[in-house]
Amino acid sequence: AETALKVSDSALAVIAVPAGGGVLRCQSSLGVQGLQAGQEITVSATVSTVIDSGEALVVRNPAQVFDDEVAGKLGSVLVFPLGHGTSDNGVLLVARAQGAALFNQSDLESSAMFGSRIGLALDLARVNALREQNLLFTDRERIARDLHDLVIQRLFAAGLSIQTLRRHTPDPVAHERINAVTRELDDTIRKLRDTIYSLRTGEEEREPLTGRILRVVRENSRSYAVTPKVALDGPVDSVPEEVAVHLLSVVSEALSNALRHSGGDEIQVEVTVGHDQVQLLLSDNGRGFTEPAQVSGLANMRYRAGLLGGSCVIESAPGKGTAVQWSARLS
């Protein structure tokens, strides 16, 4: 948009893409009457002609393209597609100031070449992005396969070996310790399987975040008598994936701590999504403790919050349970 604005000696340049329903969505805008990125523009018959035909067009009356408020400050408008006629790269609209020279045939021919080159660059960028995505998925599949074939199988074998130790000792304390280690291994295997699932799932196939939160809670608490209560508030499924993966890890870590160490019979998991952040509150009515800084996994939870511009606070007192408050910014 900046290059087009300077080269064409225009007062306004707008790049817009079809958004369906007879509207365009502004992606970039520069000039005296700039539009906001994301702002919708009603598609006039003139612009629709350019989109359908793939041919550039000079419009002498700006009111045929823009609304009255914008058009009142402008003169002629040059509208041309970005790419060939069947591409979906959108259109570029450049408008000169009111009273300035009109766009001519030479400008029209130059715009066709300019738009074609921009479209080619966009198409190449799209192809490169798809190639990189394919390489990423291939690498993820390899990592997932290695985790399943090497790590999980060894952990499972280690768990079976530990269970055989029962017959070598009658000590009930030793039996309880064996049970605890076995549960730890089972939890680790479940988390690894979740990781493998996420590595093998594409964006379009991924389970909504609400379902993944419920699944994490269900699978972590499967071996315990306590059934955590879950409350979800706000547009949880709209949380960006780069935030969601950290949120799920923190839910799993904090819930695992509460189930194993709190001794409580009530655990509450609350996820609230606001305008610009997501908040997690995980609380229990267990025994509590005097040194929250010693909570298992606290450094990891704080690190994840810090990466996302959020915070992690743990409040606890003997006999009054524990509350983990974790937050992250959505952008």
Image (cartoon, rainbow, N blue to C red):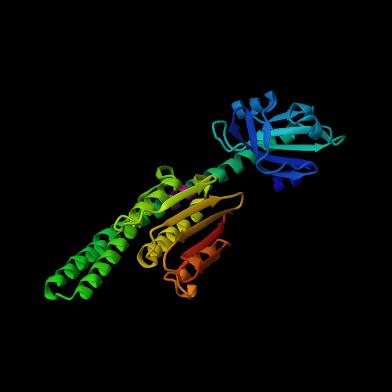
Q: Which picture quadrant has residue 99?
A: top right
The furthest residue to the front: 319
| Image position, residue 201 (x, y; %) | 38, 48
| Image position, residue 219 (x, y; %) | 33, 54
Q: Nearer the viewer, residue 52 or 256?
A: 256
- Check residue 2 for magenta coloring: no
Counting labels gives: 0
State the residue at coordinates (53%, 47%): 233
The furthest residue to the top: 45
Magenta region: which residues?
Answer: 128-132
From the viewer's perspective, is 137 left or right of 128? Answer: left
Q: Nearer the viewer, residue 282 or 206?
A: 282
**Is residue 62 positioned above or below 331 on the image?**
above
Q: Nearer the viewer, residue 329 or 102?
A: 329
- Image quadrant for the N terminus? top right
State the residue at coordinates (52%, 49%): 239
Q: Which picture quadrant has residue 175?
A: bottom left
State the residue at coordinates (53%, 65%): 312
Q: Is residue 60 visible?
A: no
From the viewer's perspective, is 6 left or right of 49? Answer: right
The furthest residue to the left: 167
| Image position, residue 183 (x, y; %) | 27, 64
| Image position, residue 231 (x, y; %) | 48, 49
- Image quadrant for the C terminus? bottom right
State the residue at coordinates (39%, 66%): 262
From the viewer's perspective, is 224 left or right of 234? Answer: left
Q: Is residue 13 visible?
A: yes
- Dominant secondary structure of the residues highlighted in magenta in the image: helix
